[in-house]
Amino acid sequence: MKIDTTNRSLSLDPRDPVFFNDPYPIYRRLRESVPVFKWEQYGYWCFARHDDVAALLRDRRFGRQILHVMTREELGWPEIPRRLKPFYDFERHSLLETEPPVHTRLRGLVNRAFLSRTVERLRPRITLLAHELIDHFADKREVELLEAFATPIPITIIAELLGVPVETGPQLLAWSHDMVAMYQARRDTQVERKAVAATLAFSDFMRRYVKERRAAPGDDLLSQLIAAEAEGRSLSEDELITTAILLLNAGHEASVHAIGNGVKALVETGQAGPGFSEGHAEELLRFDAPLHLFTRYALEDVEYNGLRLKKGETVGLLLGAANRDPVRFPEPDRFDPSRAPNPHVSFGAGIHFCVGAPLARLELNVALPILFERLPGLKLARPPRYRDAYHFHGLERLDLAW
């Protein structure tokens, strides 16, 4: 790693195990020495302080989409290779990648299903599922928690919510991993090939279930989206398919990491026991967030705190660094469930604030107390290790004993 304070630049390979296993010491150095810097390996300006990240997430001069205001030629971007077109044709309908008015329309169609009062009805199902999963390994005295607990809970809940068979979960998970790898630092031609194949297969899968739900609607989100399309509420089939897949992908990817990272933090700090509260859940999300970097495009020429950005430039917002900013969080490296207020940015902010945040919070607040009650004395069976998947930040495995 090399920090150049004169030129405000950072040279750091995000695939360096020293970094992705524990990025927080590096974030600290960046906040203190060069909180706004150009990350050479990515080629864009990044922000490490909480005030900047929170402000830019809400700043409407920045957006997730740029091709609605600039052409690829103006941006200096080459044409998308034919081999990657299926992936990017799919992505352009994504709620994550659109701006108003398209984003407003799509979000309005799914938002109601993820309101806090709506997802609260899932509490009994999450409770039952957590107990059922623990029943399978409680007598073994050791478990790899990601596979046995952290992954099945969110994938089961989002599959049931959407209305697709839970038994297809392992396949959905495989497709999801292959697709989101396009946003990780380890992207190469093999990753691209697998992402395109997963996009096509996942889309075909969803189209089959859309066809079934058209013939026999159910009490699920997929049926609601189909009804919206049928009523002419401006939802095309491509948007419907992309939205359903996005909810499946996003509905488990971050939650798996949040559960895994959270249990690890509680075990390591000696707090994996009775008394789990909503304060614990919020502090877990701050302390070791599942997503560490989110990008935006400048939608116009912008001057922000003396930094001049041209229309079309990308900026990187370091959520993981912002969540450990001592200006906003006293003693930020200390796990403190009584921390209040706790304005972490793990779910983003502004119009792209995570639509699934109420569900993710509910899963943490229901599943983790059950785990600690059923398995008192949890401890690490072997050192946990993180995945080489930056800008995601999640464990590769978490081996526990009791």
Image: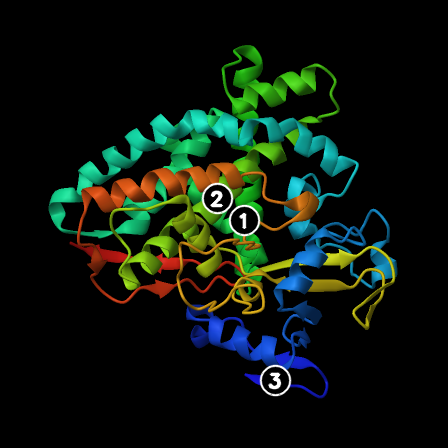
Q: Residues within 10 Å of mark 2 (few under 14, many from 20)?
A: many
Verify CB contact (< 8 Å) between mark 1 and mark 2: yes
**How far from the left and from the top, in percent, is residue 95?**
66, 40
Question: Which residue carries the number 1 mark?
Answer: 179
Report which quarter residue 153 is drawn in.
top left
Residue kind at label 1, given as amino acid type = Met
Where's the C terminus, which quadrant? Answer: bottom left
**Image point 43% across, 71% down: which residue?**
22
Residue kind at label 2, given as amino acid type = Trp
Q: Residues within 10 Å of mark 1 (few under 14, many from 20)?
A: many
Colouring method of the image: rainbow
Question: Which residue carries the number 2 mark?
Answer: 175
Residue at disc 3, secondary structure? strand
Residue 247 in the image: above or below residue 299:
above
Residue 219 in the image: above or below residue 388:
above
196 with respect to 388 (left or right): right
Residue at disc 2, secondary structure? helix
Along the viewing direction, whichever of 106 and 163 lies nearer the viewer: 106
**Image point 54% across, 49% down: which residue?**
179
C-alpha distance separating marks 1 and 2? 6 Å
Residue kind at label 3, given as amino acid type = Ile
Numbered label attached to residue 3: 3
**How far from the left and from the top, in percent, is residue 264?**
32, 58
**How far from the left and from the top, in percent, is residue 138?**
16, 43
